[in-house]
Amino acid sequence: MNKKLIQIVLFIAGNAIGAGVLGLPVSLGGVGLWPALVAMCILYGAMLYTAQVLSDFVIETRSFDLPSLFQKVLGKSGMIVFCVAYFTLFFCLLVAYWTGLGSLFAPIMFPCRGCLVGLVVLLLFQGFRSIGPLNVLLTWGFIIAFVALIFLMLRVENEMTVVIGNLAILNCSLSVILCSYGFHAAVPFLCRELDFNKKMIRKAIFWGTLFPFFFNIIIVFVSFRALSAEELQSGLARGLPVFALLCEKERMQLCAQWGQIFSFFAIITSLIGVSLTMGNALQDCFSGKLIRIFPIIVTVGLPFVISIYNPSIFIRTLEFAGGICLNIIAGILPLIGKIKNDKSFLLDFLLLIGFLYVLVVTIL
């Protein structure tokens, strides 16, 4: 791999890892280990395939962003559907991030969350160039906390959760799994950075998504080993991230502390990135005519207020973001575009039915 390809691979991995991983074990807790792993593998393959479909469209149309791409492929209606799903996705993720921070560190973290609001607002004013050194620091903190957490959780002696549990719960888990594999909005950027080289792009997407895939499996495995199915289902009912549950167990306080540190880095990196991306997208959509404070209200103020008003909305927000918004952006629209352009196979129709099924289940 050359240096540029490695940078893009790391960029994809960083975009795919976020708050979704904190909801995965809780959402899958009652399903059982093997059904959880099978579902994660199938949806990973489906999202990998649709990412390749999107990259092919970008190469063919030379589009520099997804709104113009879907306008060329599906017309104005396709662009409108994408834009609505896109901004709703980002807003839901921001609500999930602020809610996750609150549930992990409440009540002592409320003043600190106020400081984080100030930090994100400052970064929104400064722009993307201001996050370079901060992003390096956060990434190293994330890696160190992850290694320490896995080491400690593997040392916990606890009965492994059931191998095959209640498969009916799997329907509600599919949307959270989808939410943990989302990076598709960055496809035009990585295509441009790799000079529309199809072979290089396919390599970058494969290796960039492979790390989050194994990363998610490891988190689910160690969570199933440390917490019982009943404890995980209790966390799901209360809308808590997985590592918030460790704080409730006396013999796991060290794991809980490192879980909080890991969760903080996992959430804050995504929070900053999504806030900046959505803020800039709002300015672009309105040709810079928006008052600077408006994107800040939408990307920071409203999600923060909702997280305080409804602190148990974490899992439900991830389900909505993955099962509806990301499902439309990364699954349904690319496959409809491929079928419409007479470039489809039987696999495309089967995958489209699968994504539509997840959409209906999430809505119901």
Image (cartoon, helix red, strand yellow):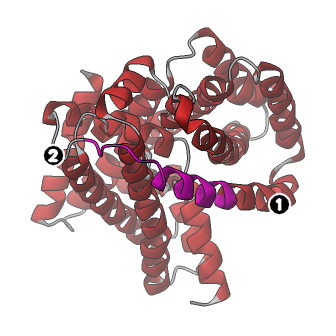
Task: Say which of 253 and 129 sits in front.
Answer: 253
Q: Nearer the viewer, mark 1 or mark 2?
A: 1
Does 62 appear in magenta? no
Residue depicted at x 42% and y 73%: 206
Quadrant holding the N terminus:
bottom right
Q: Report the span colored magenta.
A: 143-161
Residue beneath label 1, please? Answer: 132
Does 160 appear in magenta? yes
User: Quick one: label 2, few (<14), some, or many (20+) residues within 10 Å?
Assistant: few
Residue beneath label 2, please? Answer: 353
User: Quick one: label 1, few (<14), some, or many (20+) residues within 10 Å?
Assistant: few
Residue depicted at x 60% and y 24%: 103
Vertical arrangement, residue 356 with respect to residue 56, above or below: above
Q: Does residue 300 appear left or right of residue 92 in this picture?
A: right
Residue 99 on image: x %, y %: 60, 25
Residue depicted at x 75% and y 54%: 138
In the displayed orientation, state which residue is furthest to the bottom. 2
Report the amino acid beneath label 2: Ile
Task: Say which of 287 and 51 sits in front.
Answer: 51
Q: Does residue 226 appear left or right of residue 249 in this picture?
A: left
Dot 1 or dot 2: first in sequence order is: 1
Vertical arrangement, residue 188 with respect to residue 206, above or below: above
